[in-house]
Image (spheres, rainbow, N blue to C red):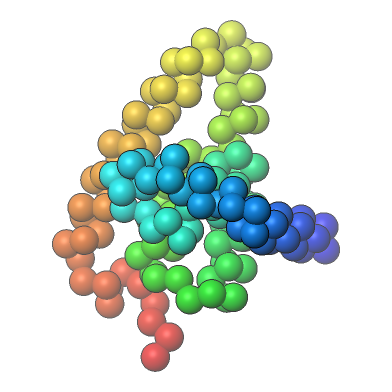
Amino acid sequence: MVISLVVLALVVLLEIMDRLGITRMLERIMSPLVKLIGISPKVMPITLIGMTLGLAYGGGLIVAQSREKPLEGRDIFLSLAFLSLFHSIIEDHLLMIAMGAHWFWIFILRLVFTLGLMILIKHLSNKIPSKYLFKTTE
């Protein structure tokens, strides 16, 4: 019940961000990164929420959003792959800093590792036919 309320609140927040133009601004800022790793700009706002709030909320939002608007299977796949590598950047990094790590190296190394792996995942997923990777609704 609580998770449903949080997901509903996040969906409402996404709608407000979209109406205020914040989504478009974030898409422009993040477009070089998005193109590099193959994530569609359509799922980037949801991915950003998952990056900050966590994998469960981000994944839940992607599932909820895919039911409302048609999203490509590849976009969902790449977004969830990115989220599984680079989620909860606030709380994870604060935990590591509390244990004595330097924030810059924790963030940069994780980001570089994620980008490298996402480029590999994008290239591999482009070589495999979609029918083997994604469920179709036919």
Q: How many marks?
A: 0
| Rendered residue at 51%/46% (across/down) | 25
* Relative depth, front residue between 34 and 95: 34
Q: Is residue 3 visible?
A: no
Which picture quadrant has residue 93? Answer: top right
Q: Residue visible at 47% across and 23% down?
A: 107
Q: Write down the quadrant of residue 115 in the picture.
A: top left
Vertical arrangement, residue 133 with respect to residue 49, above or below: below
What residue lies at 64% left-to-right and 30% top-to-bottom?
91
Residue 117 visible at all? yes
Q: Quadrant of the N terminus?
A: bottom right
Quadrant location of the C terminus in the rendered image: bottom left
Please state which of residues 137 and 71 is positioned toward the viewer in this rendering.
71
| Extreme residue in the bottom direction | 138
Above or below — where is 54 with respect to 103? Answer: below
Query: Residue 7 at x, y = what percent?
Result: 71, 59
Q: Position of residue 18 (x, y in %)?
A: 61, 58
Residue at x 59% of width, y 48% of height: 22
Residue 13 is situated, as x and y percent measured from the top left of the image, at 71, 55
